Amino acid sequence: MDFDLQILEQHFPELTDLQKDRFAAYANLIAEWNEKINLISRADIENLPKKHLLHSLAIAKAIQFKDGTRVMDVGTGGGFPGIPLAILFPECGFHLVDSIGKKVKVVVDCVHKLGLDNVSAEQARAEKVSNQYDFIVARAVTQLPRFMNWIRKRVKRTAFNDLPNGVLYLKGGKLDDDFASIKETPTAYRIQEFFDYDEFQEKHVIHIPVSRD
C-alpha cells in the first residue's frame, strides 16, 4: 500500500530520510503481514500511520530517551510501540517480547528487513525475562495491577533519563480504578495534547515510576 506518512513528518519534523524510509517500509510490512496474521483491525489498516505509528510515538512526546536507554516492549504484537520507537531512537536498545510465536516471527522479519540493529525479539512472558531495563513500554496488554506485578523486577534501579525509570503505558478510557489498585503514583499525559485528533480524545501515555526499595 502507498501510505501517506505526512502526519509523522508534521509532528516529528526532525525525521531523517532513513527514518522516513523505515517508517514507510514498516507500514507496508505490517499491511502485508496483516493479510496472513491478524495483527491489527483490518478496518484500521488504511489509518495505520495515525492509529498505530503516531499512537506509538506519543511516548516520545512524554519522554525523549537518552542515548543508551534500554527498553522492553511487552506484548508487542506486530511491533507496537517498540519498532516505531526504535526507528525514532536508533541509539537506544529495544527488546520486544510476546507470548505468541507467530507475532514474534513478524517482528523478527520486520526488524531484519528494516535493518534495525538496535532491536531484539523473544517469544516470552514478561515475568520470565531475566534482564532489566530502564523502561517497560506496552499498549494496554492487560489491567495495570496485573501488568505491574509482571514487570516490577524488570526495571533497573539506577536512572539517567529525565523521567524516573519505570513503565510507559498506552491506555484509553477511564484510569481511576487502575490507578487506585497499584502502589505507585502514575502520571497520565493526554495524547490529544500532543496530537490534536479525535481518535486520541480519551487516550493517554501513563508514566509509572518503579522503585523496588
Image (spheres, rainbow, N blue to C red):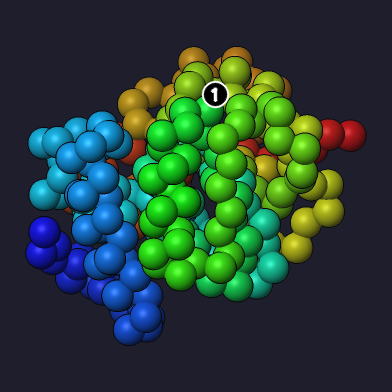
212 vs 160, left or right, is right
Q: Position of residue 60 (x, y in %)?
A: 46, 60
Residue 159 in view here: yes
Q: Residue at x 59, y 41 (%)?
A: 122
Query: Does residue 184 appear anywhere in the picture?
Result: no
| Residue shown at 83% from the left, 34% from the top | 212
Q: In the image as oriented, which residue stretches furthest toward the right?
A: 213
Point 65% across, 72% down: residue: 67
Left or right of residue 139, residue 71 in this image: right
Work out whether residue 19 or residue 188 is closer to the camera in this orientation and state it: 19
State which quadrant residue 126 falls in: top right
Report the quarter where the C terminus lies.
top right
The secondary element bearing badge 1 is classed as helix
Which residue is denoted by mark 1 in the rendering?
A: 144
Q: Nearer the viewer, residue 37 or 171?
A: 37
Q: Position of residue 97 (x, y in %)?
A: 56, 39
Q: How many marks?
A: 1
Rendering coords of residue 65 (x, y %): 59, 64
Say which quadrant the N terminus sits in.
bottom left
Q: Residue furthest bottom?
A: 17
Q: Residues within 10 Å of mark 1 (few under 14, many from 20)?
A: some
Residue type pointed to by label 1: Leu
Along the viewing direction, whichever of 164 and 140 lies nearer the viewer: 140
